[in-house]
Image (cartoon, rainbow, N blue to C red):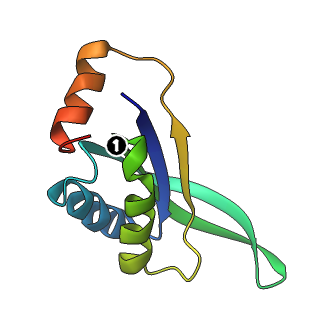
Amino acid sequence: MDATLVMVTAPSGEAARALGRALVEARLAASVNISAGVTSYYWWEGAVQEGAEALLFAKTRGDLVGQVIDFVKARHPYVCPAILATPIVAGNPDYLAWIEKETGEG
């Protein structure tokens, strides 16, 4: 199984919770964790910005990443949301099998 971790920043815990719940309900992610109170620094519109954000961690299958990206972009309040995916190279085999089961047929 090709498990993947997708990370998404959101402008608030509320926005992250809405995105996370929607991803799980759509079965595009088996699980989502949210870490609120993240401080972010980034270039935007020609200047360094600082902002409080929430960070969403979604566990899914690699073959669903494109759908996850499209799904998040369609619902995200940012013009250019940070959506990054990285393969899960190792983990509890039972948990990895659970990700596959909860995200539907592979």
The structure residue drawn at horizontal position 17% and vertical position 34%, both measured from the top left corner, is 101
Above or below for 79 versus 59: below
Quadrant (top left/top right/bottom left/bottom right) for the N terminus: top left
Residue 103: x, y in percent? 21, 44
Circle 1 Cα neighbour tier, 10 Å, few/some/many (<14 / 14–19 / ≥20): many
Of residue 65 and residue 38, the one placed in the foreground of this image is: 65
Quadrant (top left/top right/bottom left/bottom right) for the C terminus: top left
Farthest residue, direction front: 106
The structure residue drawn at horizontal position 20% and vertical position 28%, both measured from the top left corner, is 98
Residue 68: x, y in percent? 38, 60
The structure residue drawn at horizontal position 45% and vertical position 63%, both measured from the top left corner, is 69
Give, as a three-letter code, the residue at label 1. Thr
Per the image, the residue denoted by label 1 is: 60
Of residue 48 and residue 70, the one placed in the foreground of this image is: 70
Above or below for 95 versus 21: above
| Image-quadrant location for residue 76 | bottom left
Farthest residue, direction right: 46
Viewed as shown, does residue 58 lie left or right of 38?
A: left
